[in-house]
């Protein structure tokens, strides 16, 4: 037992010490410009700037790359030494903050092949993985997890909701060599499963048997009409009847206007369409399930997870309202390392960020309240001044009246 515990401890230390960070970016100063390349494929691409935003937990640690121009496409990327995730876990993690209360725009990253043309980067540039939040209106608030497989971009078949508030959130994608995955938001699992099941990498493993047909005598209606139930004799009444209170207008001319007919009204005695009472169907066999067979076109691929030439990461997105901040990017082969990195960065500043935002909101609320009271006081002063002026006018009129009487 002691030997087993010692072995597990060594394994944990080995995993922590010997994990590989393929790429790390904290955007701590302007030196990021030496590592990131802005695309020149289009002349009107939006500009990024270094910013911690209007509220933050730490002025330096929360510096990130912020979109700065409304209604623009953005394209910027950073390269690193090419690697393959063969036989290894691949973790892609970053933080994103929509302090502008984003209404439509991307907050995701793309991981590219090593030979990607960074200067020519556009939305058409081939990528390996696209991961992160995307928001557009009230309907679209999702986390994209897109893999490129045999030249096709495959979207996840599950709906993963993203965060849509103004705070910084941590997004993590874990891709395992056993063809499983996990998505985390703020270090909490929100989705997981098998690649083969949640993406259309291959044709289905099983398909409905094309030779199987539902038997002609199969009964799949659980209910039936009660054969003993009959329609009452007085059931059938017209839905509408002539209005008995209507009277022919005095100026109605049958020769000119045609034969007069009273308008129709709803019949209070109308009972609707009669249907027989429902009872359990004694012949019911249940829902017929189409038998399945192995799909002859299916080919198992143990390497759905594999990308052999990962070498760049980029921000290629569109934003209607700018202000999103990207930060704390890491690509590694260790989940533990990603967790530690998240705690060192986002974990240490998130509470301070929230506190600063709440203080700013309270200050704004107080400012608006003070302005409201000021306007009310000014309105009251104006009203009082108007009342005094009216009183002075009355006094003047009264004085003049007395003088006239004396004259």
Image (cartoon, rainbow, N blue to C red):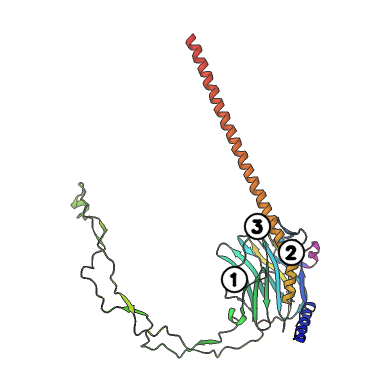
Q: Nearer the viewer, residue 303 or 18?
A: 18
Tell me the number on the disc at residue 348: 2
Name the residue carrying label 1.
160
Judge whether residue 111 is colored magenta: no
Q: Residue 30: image x %, image y %?
A: 80, 61
Q: Residue 361: image x %, image y %?
A: 65, 52
Q: Is residue 286 left or right of residue 60?
A: left
Residue furthest out toward the front: 1
Q: Check disc 2: other Cα within 10 Å, few if <14, some if 14-19, many if 20+.
A: some
The residue segment tinted magenta is 27-35
Q: Earlier in the sequence, mark 1 or mark 3?
A: 3
For residue 117, say whether it is visible.
no
Of the 4 image quadrants, the one containing the N terminus is: bottom right
Q: Earlier in the sequence, mark 2 or mark 1?
A: 1
Q: In the displayed structure, would residue 349 be above or below residue 391?
A: below
- Measured Cα–Cα span from mark 2 to mark 1: 26 Å
Q: Nearer the viewer, residue 326 or 176?
A: 176
Q: Is residue 284 left or right of residue 103?
A: left
**Residue at figure coordinates x 23%, y 55% from the top left:** 243
Q: Residue 254: image x %, image y %?
A: 18, 52
Q: Secondary structure at mark 2?
A: helix
Q: Earlier in the sequence, mark 3 or mark 2?
A: 3
Q: Residue 165: image x %, image y %?
A: 63, 61
Residue furthest out toward the top: 407
Quarter occupied by residue 166: bottom right
Name the residue carrying label 3.
100
């Amino acid at each position: 037992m002691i030997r087993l515990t010692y072995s597990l401890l060594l394994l944990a230390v080995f995993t922590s010490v010997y994990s590989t960070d393929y790429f790390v970016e904290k955007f701590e100063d302007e030196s990021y410009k030496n590592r990131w390349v802005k695309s020149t494929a289009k002349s009107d691409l939006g500009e990024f700037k270094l910013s911690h935003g209007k509220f933050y937990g730490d002025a330096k640690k929360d510096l990130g790359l912020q979109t700065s121009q409304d209604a623009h496409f953005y394209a910027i990327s950073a390269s690193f030494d090419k690697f393959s995730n063969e036989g290894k876990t691949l973790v892609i993690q970053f933080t994103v903050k929509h302090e502008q209360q984003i209404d439509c725009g991307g907050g995701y990253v793309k991981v590219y092949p090593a030979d990607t043309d960074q200067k020519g980067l556009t939305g058409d540039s081939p990528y390996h993985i696209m991961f992160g939040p995307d928001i557009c209106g009230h309907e679209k608030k999702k986390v994209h997890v897109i893999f490129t497989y045999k030249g096709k971009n495959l979207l996840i078949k599950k709906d993963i909701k993203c965060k849509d508030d103004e705070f910084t959130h941590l997004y993590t994608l874990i891709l395992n060599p056993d063809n499983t995955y996990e998505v985390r938001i703020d270090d909490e699992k929100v989705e997981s499963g098998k690649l083969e099941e949640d993406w259309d990498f291959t044709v289905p493993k099983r398909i409905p048997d094309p030779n199987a047909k539902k038997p002609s005598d199969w009964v799949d209606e659980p209910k039936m009409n009660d054969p003993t139930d009959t329609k009452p004799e007085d059931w059938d009444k017209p839905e509408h009847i002539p209005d008995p209170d209507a009277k022919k207008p005095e100026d109605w001319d049958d020769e000119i206007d045609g034969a007069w007919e009273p308008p129709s009204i709803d019949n209070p005695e109308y009972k609707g369409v009669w249907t027989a009472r429902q009872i359990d169907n004694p012949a019911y066999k249940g829902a017929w399930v189409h038998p399945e067979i192995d799909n002859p076109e299916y080919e198992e691929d143990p390497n759905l997870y594999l990308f052999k030439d990962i070498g760049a990461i980029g921000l290629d997105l569109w934003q209607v309202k700018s202000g999103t901040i990207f930060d704390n990017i890491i690509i590694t082969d260790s989940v533990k390392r990603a967790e530690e990195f998240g705690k060192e960065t986002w974990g240490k500043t998130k509470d301070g960020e929230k506190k600063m935002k709440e203080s700013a909101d309270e200050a704004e609320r107080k400012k608006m309240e003070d302005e409201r009271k000021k306007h009310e006081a000014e309105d009251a002063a104006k009203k009082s001044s108007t009342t005094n002026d009216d009183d002075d006018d009355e006094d003047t009129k009264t004085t003049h009246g007395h003088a006239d009487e004396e004259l």
